[in-house]
Amino acid sequence: QLLLQESGPGLVKPWETLSLTCSVSGGSITDHRYHWGWIRQPPGKGLEWIGSVYYDGKTYYNPSLKSRATVSIDTPKSQFFLNLRSVTAADTAVYYCARDAGGSTSDIWGQGILVTVSS
Amino acid sequence: QSALTQPPSASGSPGQSVTISCTGTSNDVGGYDFVSWYQQHPGQAPKVIIHAVNKRPSGVPDRFSGSKSGNTASLTVSGLQAEDEADYYCGSYADSNNPHVLFGGGTKLTVL
């Protein structure tokens, strides 16, 4: 079955760039039916959609994060990526990658990775 | 853009029904039939239990149902069971000029 796995540093310094990778296995990242997205959840708080990417590179972003976030894709490697620039403590969260089935539906999620922003 | 509005908590006894609301605007919940509901148990990733307002993915019990009226969507859990105790989040497609997804703040459901 399709599996998604987040990877990247668990600690990032303030004002630096948070960079995460999502590796997709057990299915095709070029499946035309799906986008690939990032969602985060600060400790003890709710979900926040960050953005998504299609296999052709087209991207969509949360307006509140659009100026700092970049989502990209590498189809031969079956991976997609999140870069979040100029992070602060408010960006500390569990970051999930997920398959976006359209509308507002993320139907398969990775296990999540906790990223802490601290000096 | 503001998150969708959910009550912070809800509760019911085993066997009872409980309904959780999710209020948005005509630019999100009210404008599109793209409302999803997620269940999240502690320490786990969210799991979609309703999509497209009222459709249940394969494997989700029919005790879970969704509906929408105007700018408010609702999730109803019938025949409450202990394992239904979890956090529930709504999500909606928003703004066709700048497509994105909004989530609600979440509702903690307690089975008494």
Image (cartoon, rainbow, N blue to C red):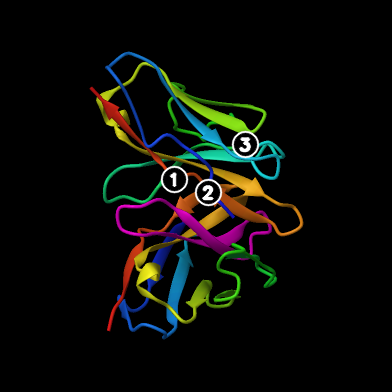
Q: Residues within 10 Å of mark 2 (few under 14, many from 20)?
A: many
Residue A55 vertical position relative to residue B23 in the rendered view, above or below: below
Taking the image as drawn, is residue B24 in sight?
yes
Q: Amino acid at mark 3?
A: Ala
Seen in the image, is B6 located left or right of residue A44? right
Q: Secondary structure at mark 3?
A: loop
| Left or right: residue A11 compared with residue A68 | left
Q: Residue furthest top?
A: B15
Residue indicated by mark 3: B52
Between A29 and B43, which is closer to the camera in this rendering?
A: B43
Which residue appears at 55% of the width and 51% of the height? B2
Q: Amino acid at mark 2?
A: Ala
Looking at the image, which residue is at 64% across and 47% down?
A: B93
Residue B4 x, y percent position in the rendering:
54, 43
Q: Nearer the viewer, mark 3 or mark 1?
A: 1
Which stretch is magenta?
A27-51
Report whether residue B55 is seen. no
Q: Reading the chain from its start, which is encountered first: label 3 or label 2?
A: 2
Q: CA distance from mark 2 to mark 1?
A: 7 Å
Chain bearing tag 2 is: B
Q: CA distance from mark 3 to mark 1?
A: 19 Å
**Residue A20 x, y percent position in the rendering:** 43, 75
- Given the image, what chain letter belongs to the residue carrying mark 1? B
Quarter-of-image position of residue B78: top left
How crowded pointer 1 is (Cα within 10 Å; few <14, some 14-19, many 20+) is rated as: many
The residue at the point 30 percent across, 58 percent down is: A43
Q: Could you confirm whether marks 2 and 1 are on the same chain? A: yes
- The residue at which mark 1 appears reads as B105
Query: From what the image shows, is residue B69 above or below residue B104?
Result: above
**Mark 3 near mark 2, Cβ–Cβ under 8 Å?**
no
* Amino acid under disc 1: Gly
